[in-house]
Amino acid sequence: MRDKEIERLIKLEEKRQKGAVNLIASENYVSKDVLSALGSVFTNKYAEGYAGKRYYGGNEVVDKIENLAKARALKLFKISEKKWSANVQPYSGSPANLAVYLALVPLGKKIMGMSLSMGGHLTHGHLVSATGKLWKWSHFGVGKKTELLDYDEISKMARREKPKLIVAGFTAYSRIIDFKKLRKIADETGAFLMIDMSHFAGLVAGGAYPSPFPYADIVTTTVHKTLRGPRSAIIFAAKRRSFIASGEVGFLNEAINKAVFPGLQGGPHVNQIAAVAVALKEAENPSFKKYARQIIKNSRKLSTELARRGWRIISGGTDSHLFLVDTWMRGISGKTAEELLGKKGIIVNKNTIPYDTRSPFDPSGIRIGTAAATTTGLKEKDMLRIADRIDDILKAL
Ligand SMILES: Cc1ncc(COP(=O)(O)O)c(C=O)c1O
């Protein structure tokens, strides 16, 4: 690299990433092939529009890449082109979610989702997010005792609020989501059901977590978490007709395509799309199934071992790559825990826990995830060691 200043910083970051145990639930390490595609000449190309209908010349190869990425996305999640379409252009998870709302829900109308403080995402209608300002949201959480989704409560809220869309799929909820129950609630109240599987997409791809596709109208996902691809997102939409945001009857997939481009974005990041295609093929490999199962084994082992050492795990355990630990029960705030662990090379993030009485800037817990650590080859015996280290570091306070 000619730019020595940037080269030095890249090397520093490489060293940091290699030298720490990464337990950030939303991160992962991509393959060299994904990095090559990201750094390829596709970054030079403008390709506004969709395959076969571009606003720029010279897109013959780009069309092939985009079509391949879409076909691989459908194949990986075992859905047919007859019933579903994939849009691989969203720059990331936040614009993907915004595009869905813009396509399906008139501005100012009602949407239902999980509150950020209970495990939802900013783009599920938090007030500081554009999504929270442009639509009227009702937020559900988890039961106070069980710390699990309470489907009766969700059903009651949906019948009362009559939202146009119900959004589920979270950043800090560790359990299996009952998609079937959510479908029933959506049907009873005439709402669309959108599952944001950003966090657990890799687990679905690897057959280690239930698939939302039999139940959802729309599925959004980031590619860079458990799916182990580049920073990017995909929107899957059922090819069916319904009333959409414009007030007309239209195909959901067509409305979403329009909302992504030209509604929200300009030229797609073709280098990203190439890297998405690479990651989707990698996730087809049988070794990815093993990887997905190992992520969950590691997550269960780490949470069980921490519980054995006296730490309270929210909802008593996990069915996924992540879980929350209540550190405040021992008088240690999430911020302090994050800092203490970080100094010793264990990277986690502070997180609110359900019904948190503390502020999100210094909440009562930490979130732990095992997708990145599993990519580096760590297994259950390593989780035992990490549980000991976390316990020792926090107890020393
Ligand atoms: C459930 C969920 N949806 C959407 C997003 C947004 O993705 P991005 O950060 O790529 O905009 C995230 C990211 O953390 C997420 O966890």
Image (spheres, rainbow, N blue to C red):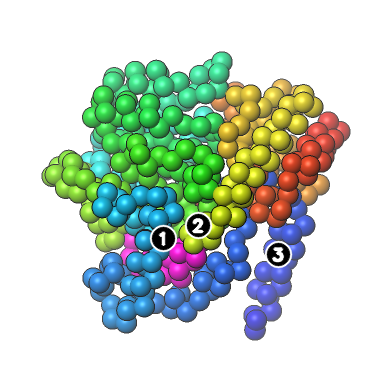
Type of amino acid under label 2: Glu
Q: Which of pointers 1 and 3 lies earlier in the amino acid sequence?
A: 3
Residue designated by label 1: 72
| Residue 321 lies within the magenta run | no
Marks 1,2: beta carbons within 8 A: yes
Q: Determine whether the residue tagged by mark 2 lies in a helix, strand or loop.
A: helix
Query: What secondary structure characterizes most of the magenta part?
Result: helix
Q: Secondary structure at mark 1?
A: helix
**Magenta residue span:** 263-279
Q: Is residue 267 magenta?
A: yes
Where does the image place residue 251, in percent across and percent down from the top left? 20, 49
Q: Is residue 45 left or right of residue 30?
A: left
Say which residue appears at 61% left-offset and 31% top-offset. Answer: 318
Spatial CA distance of label 1 from label 3 is 30 Å
Characterize the local packing of mark 2: few (<14), some (14-19) or many (20 or more) Cα atoms within 10 angstroms: some
Q: Is residue 202 above or below residue 306?
A: below
Residue in the foreground of this view, choosing between 189 and 133: 189
Q: Pointer 2: what residue?
A: 284
Write the residue at 40% across / 28% down: 139
Q: Which mark is residue 14?
A: 3
Is 335 situated above or below 76?
A: above
Residue 152 in view in this figure: yes
First along the sequence among labels 1 and 2: 1
Q: Position of residue 153 (x, y in %)?
A: 40, 18
The amino acid type found where label 1 is placed reads Arg
Q: Viewer-nearest of labels 1 and 3?
A: 1
Give the foreground label among 2 and 3: 2
Q: Secondary structure at mark 3?
A: helix
